[in-house]
Amino acid sequence: MARPDEIRTWFYSLSINSEAFGGSNGRPLAPHLMVAFIYLDSLLCQMLPSKGRDFTVAIEKGDDGYYIATVVELPGCHTQAKTLKELDKRVKEAIEVNLEARGNDLKIPELLAVKKVHV
């Protein structure tokens, strides 16, 4: 049986790259599927053993093909990489550096929802 972290990596890769999810040819993931992905990702996170804090990361694909990550709870905490695997490593490093610079008494607001607004 696959471990939760293996399932999460597989689902993440599938959601970004599969035509069925609207993620190929540089097109962004369909909004309703992104919300479903965030929900499923949060469920998988609960299954994984964790010692630290959880952060919400918004990932975009730039015009140059790089993946760009923004940590929602930490304003100014961004990074980029050519692959999702490298981005995962870099975003963890960026969070660690950001938290170290802010100090141990940092109060991080709880993220209540991720929502798209049509205007």
Image: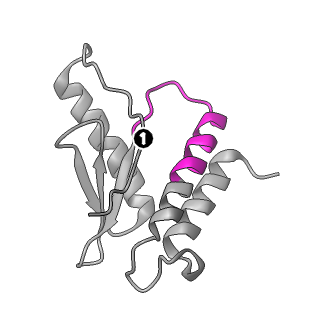
* Residue that lies at the very extreme toward the front in this rendered image: 119
Residue pictured at 43% horizontal, 28% vertical: 53
The picture places residue 78, in percent across and down from the top left corner, at: 23, 50
Judging from the image, the colouring scheme is one colour
The reply to whether the magenta stretch includes residue 47 is yes
Tell me which amino acid carries mark 1.
Answer: Ala
Q: Secondary structure at mark 1?
A: loop
Which quadrant of the view contains residue 63? bottom left
* Residue that lies at the very extreme toward the bottom in this rendered image: 25
The picture places residue 71, in percent across and down from the top left corner, at: 30, 44
Q: Is residue 57 depicted above or below 59 in this figure? A: above
Q: Is residue 43 depicted above or below 35 in this figure? A: above
Residue pictured at 35% horizontal, 53% vertical: 58
* Residue that lies at the very extreme toward the top in this rendered image: 105
Q: Is residue 104 left or right of residue 56?
A: left
The picture places residue 75, in percent across and down from the top left corner, at: 19, 39
Q: Is residue 59 left or right of residue 13?
A: left
Q: Is residue 21 depicted above or below 70 in this figure? A: below
The reply to whether the magenta stretch includes residue 106 is no
What residue does disc 1 label? 113
Residue pictured at 60% horizontal, 50% vertical: 40
Density class for disc 1 (Cα within 10 Å; few <14, some 14-19, many ≥20) is few
The picture places residue 86, in percent across and down from the top left corner, at: 39, 59
Which contiguous range is marked in magenta? 38-55
Nearest to the observer: residue 100 or residue 15 = 15
Residue pictured at 30% horizontal, 42% vertical: 72
